[in-house]
Amino acid sequence: MTDHELQRAAAAIAGASSVALACHVNPDGDALGSMLGMFHLCRAAGKPAVASWPEPFVVAPHYTYLPGLDLMTKPADFPAAPDVMLTFDCGSLDRLGSLAAPAQAAAELIVVDHHVTNDRFGTINLIDADAAATAVVVRALAAQLGWSLNAEAAVCLYTGIVTDTGRFQYSNTTPAVFELAGELSGFGLPIAAISRQLFEEHRFAYLQLVADCLGRAELDRELRLVSTSVTAADLRRRGVEIDETEGLIDIVRRASEAEVACVLKEAPDGIRVSLRALSEVDVGAIAVTFGGGGHRYAAGFTAAGSVPAVLAAIKAALRAQ
Ligand code: AMP
Ligand code: MN
Ligand code: MN
């Protein structure tokens, strides 16, 4: 991300009578947090803004505390051809689902992201692959605009950085991340309540589903791969929504024998795969070969087929790497 791109983005936003914001499908903490953070900054600056994400237009239970969710626009009501549109945490157009059409029709499309696999689909690309989260890029954009932070935006941006750094534990946790976290926490964030809802609290039914999935997890000692699945039958039997299972990969990847962890989920749109690398294996590169994306150590994709077939394809890709 160059200063020139940052200046162009700020000028486009400053000159717009309104902006349209969108984040990736099945939004995580950074997608929602960076988009809502910008939404609150716009409101405070008197800049009319709408914000949305593609169907299914739902929020996973651990993100429901985010301020502004009640002010979101349904994707069906999103402007068809915005003057200025911003996308958040979205590495490619297809991750925008039905909002890809407005993005393509937008006069100016500002892509705010940190995925190394980002294919630069904007007219202005604010992409910093060294940023721990898209929320970090939003902070830089706000500074360029001369907009000061506020309490609502701080909660949202903090959510982006705390989730994408794995609670300040991953290798992307730089001094700059702690500085930003310090700045944000100065707004009186309810840190303990946020942490509990994000990471520490689940319905009992989810714990039972975790037991099912861990019970049949597989360790491939040759490939140093630990994997498990969440089937539609698991979700039905335990009465759990697929969005509740985002943290399962963080348990599976604890296996010390493994260098790669994988969770495959039977979703309405196909087999949703989460990959984590604990060594030099580049799971982002593997996800790209399956039409997905992400980062070196955390990536994902959605594929057609069955859980065993997709797992077999992943094993073949790991052998090839
Ligand atoms: P997840 O395993 O869903 O937490 O995702 C890990 C990383 O991979 C995140 O940076 C996601 O943005 C990225 N990712 C996950 N699924 C996809 C996908 N279908 N296409 C592109 N990137 C993805
Ligand atoms: Mn994301
Ligand atoms: Mn992110």
Image (cartoon, rainbow, N blue to C red):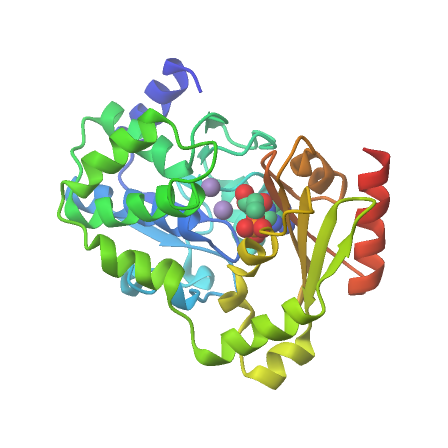
Q: Where's residue 129, x and y in %?
A: 50, 27
Vertical arrangement, residue 93 with respect to residue 74, above or below: above
Q: Residue at x 18, y 50 (%)?
A: 189
Residue that extends furthest to the front in the rendered view of this protein: 256
Vertical arrangement, residue 114 with respect to residue 225, above or below: above
- Toward the viewer: 255 or 170? 255
Q: Residue at x 41, y 61 (%)?
A: 77
- Toward the viewer: 151 or 119? 151
Numbered circles on residues, count: 0
The answer to whether residue 47 is visible is: no
Q: Residue at x 54, y 54 (%)?
A: 250
Q: Where's residue 63, x and y in %?
A: 36, 61
Q: Where's residue 75, x and y in %?
A: 46, 60
Left or right: residue 119 compared with residue 21: right
| Screen quadrant of the C terminus | top right
Vertical arrangement, residue 24 with respect to residue 242, above or below: above
Where residue 310 sits, quadrant-wise, is: bottom right
Q: Where's residue 256, x and y in %?
A: 63, 47
Where residue 52 sits, quadrant-wise, is: bottom left
Left or right: residue 27 compared with residue 211: left
Vertical arrangement, residue 113 with respect to residue 305, above or below: above
Left or right: residue 183 compared with residue 197: left
| Screen quadrant of the N terminus | top left
- Toward the viewer: 201 or 13? 201
The answer to whether residue 97 is visible is: yes
